[in-house]
């Protein structure tokens, strides 16, 4: 029997009731030997995530404002969980150390990581498994860049010593021992790294949903679930806003063809969504796998006669953006034109200065800026081999009176990305869903 790695998200470990469900899931399958946990999430609407409270403590201290009440909320929550679960664990000692480091200015990464650290300690004691700290195993260099090979070696060597273990997600350490965290949701990455290190047969990611849906349920009523999806399809959907799994959690397991199974802690018998190296198009007539998108992009369009004959023009444009530390989401282009699509939050207050520099260094014949643009990706492995897919999509948008501001299609032909006005975002997604999914059901 192969080894399974199970990662449980914040909602799955939010309180003693949820942790009891986690224990039942683990005991139901002895192959689930290595468990990765997030910090406790919200227990109900209006509740706070532990990580958010920890960040808030740090913010208070940075502004010389006492955080005693907030810190006590965190302490009380963990103590209540320990008492409810009947766990004999000296948490008071841990809180004293954390508070001392908080007041010594240890920094936001350390503070935020304590949510996972404490929860892993608590969960390990409750499950009767070893606690293995991610510190010293998940490694970053002195500049904060993640070290893949070093991490894989360290995790593999350490976990061989444990027949079962609970590992905190979200963080690791730099060479000087300082805690370094991944971006929010990074416990998914830790789970993937552990699965790679132990050559798991599957990486189970337990959350509060049954897996991926073909569209956002806040926009489309009762969208179809996705039973199987490829790594590549998932990457496209995650990048465009589908948020069930951290987009960077794919890479560690992808190299070893370890499937990821998204499961629901509150409904453990549901098969969820299986993420595999390559998924064949379904045999039910469906063309697309899913639809995802995001709002609030800015498009800067440049036109210059004979642009295509001017060596290095686009390179110089990208160099200007690099100088402002701006990443480009998309770069649709024509013979004498190019557009850069930038997330609005990356521009900050630099748009005017940026445009001046583009004018000065590139001398475009015209320079146009479009604000409040939403990007929508229609994704599916089966799209490349189906005639009329693009026509079907554009017809659906036209019939819904949605004006397309931009079109971009990847070379893999796995997705078609359209830019529309923010105000048309939801209408466009529903129109695409109806054209490709609802019509198929009829």
Image: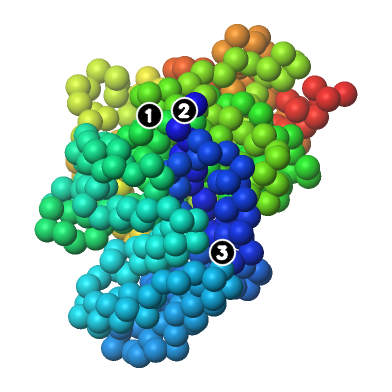
Percent x, y of residue 202: 49, 31
Q: Nearer the viewer, mark 3 or mark 2?
A: 2
Residue at image x 27%, y 30%? 314
Quickly name the residue at label 2.
Answer: 2
Residue 328 placement (x, y as % from top left): 35, 40
Label 3 crowding class (10 Å Cα cut-off): few <14, some 14-19, many 20+?
many
Q: Residue 88 lies in what quarter of the image?
A: bottom left
Q: Position of residue 356 (x, y in %)?
A: 26, 51
Q: Which residue is mark 1?
A: 199
Q: Nearer the viewer, mark 1 or mark 2?
A: 2
Q: Residues within 10 Å of mark 2 (few under 14, many from 20)?
A: few
Task: Residue 188: give its label.
Answer: none
> Position of 335 compared to 102: left or right?
right
Question: Does residue 221 sit above or below 387 in this rendering?
Answer: below
Q: Is residue 283 above or below residue 167?
A: above
Q: How is the image coloured?
A: rainbow
Q: Secondary structure at mark 2?
A: loop
Q: Which of the pair 16/255 is nearer the observer? A: 16
Figure check: 11 above or below 383? below
The answer to whether residue 353 is seen in the rendering is: no
Q: Are marks 3 and 2 in contact (CB under 8 Å)?
A: no
Relative to 104, is 195 on the left or the right?
A: right
Q: Secondary structure at mark 1?
A: loop
Sooner in the amino-acid sequence: mark 3 or mark 2: 2
Mark 3, residue position:
14
């Amino acid at each position: 029997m192969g080894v399974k790695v199970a990662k449980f998200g914040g909602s799955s470990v939010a309180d003693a009731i949820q942790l009891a469900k986690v224990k039942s899931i683990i005991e139901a399958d002895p192959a689930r030997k290595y468990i990765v946990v997030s910090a406790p999430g919200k227990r109900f609407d209006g509740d706070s995530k532990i990580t958010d409270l920890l960040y808030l403590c740090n913010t208070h201290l940075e502004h010389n404002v006492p955080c005693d009440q907030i810190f006590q909320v965190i302490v009380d929550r963990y103590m209540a969980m320990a008492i409810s679960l009947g766990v004999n664990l000296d948490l008071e000692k841990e809180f004293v150390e954390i508070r001392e480091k908080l007041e010594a200015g240890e920094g936001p990464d350390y503070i935020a990581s304590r949510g996972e650290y404490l929860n892993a300690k608590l969960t390990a004691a409750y499950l009767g498994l070893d606690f293995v700290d991610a510190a010293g195993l998940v490694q970053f260099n002195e500049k904060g860049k993640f070290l893949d090979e070093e991490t894989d070696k360290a995790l593999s060597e350490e976990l061989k010593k444990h027949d079962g273990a609970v590992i905190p997600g979200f963080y690791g350490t730099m060479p000087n021992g300082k805690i370094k965290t991944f971006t929010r949701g990074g416990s998914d990455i830790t789970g993937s790294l552990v699965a790679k290190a132990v050559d798991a047969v599957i990486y189970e990611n337990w959350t509060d949903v049954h897996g991926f849906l073909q569209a956002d349920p806040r926009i489309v009523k009762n969208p179809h679930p996705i039973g199987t999806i490829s790594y590549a399809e998932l990457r496209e959907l995650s990048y465009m806003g589908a948020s069930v799994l951290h987009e960077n959690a794919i890479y560690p397991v992808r190299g070893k063809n370890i499937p990821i199974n998204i499961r629901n802690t509150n409904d453990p018998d549901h098969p969820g969504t299986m993420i595999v190296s390559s998924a064949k198009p379904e045999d039910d007539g469906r063309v697309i796998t899913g639809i995802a998108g995001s709002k609030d992009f800015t498009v800067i369009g440049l036109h210059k006669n004979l642009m295509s004959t001017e060596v290095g023009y686009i390179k110089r444009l990208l160099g200007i953006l690099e100088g402002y530390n701006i990443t480009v989401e998309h770069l649709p282009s024509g013979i004498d034109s190019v557009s850069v699509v930038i997330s609005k939050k990356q521009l900050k207050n630099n748009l005017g200065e940026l445009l001046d520099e583009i004018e000065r260094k590139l001398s475009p014949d015209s320079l146009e800026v479009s604000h409040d643009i939403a990007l929508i990706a229609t994704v599916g492995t089966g799209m490349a081999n189906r005639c009329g897919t693009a026509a079907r999509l554009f017809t659906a948008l036209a019939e819904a009176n949605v004006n397309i501001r931009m079109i971009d299609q990847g070379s893999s032909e796995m997705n078609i990305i359209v830019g529309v006005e923010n105000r048309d975002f939801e209408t466009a997604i529903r129109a695409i869903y109806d054209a490709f999914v609802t019509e198929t059901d009829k």
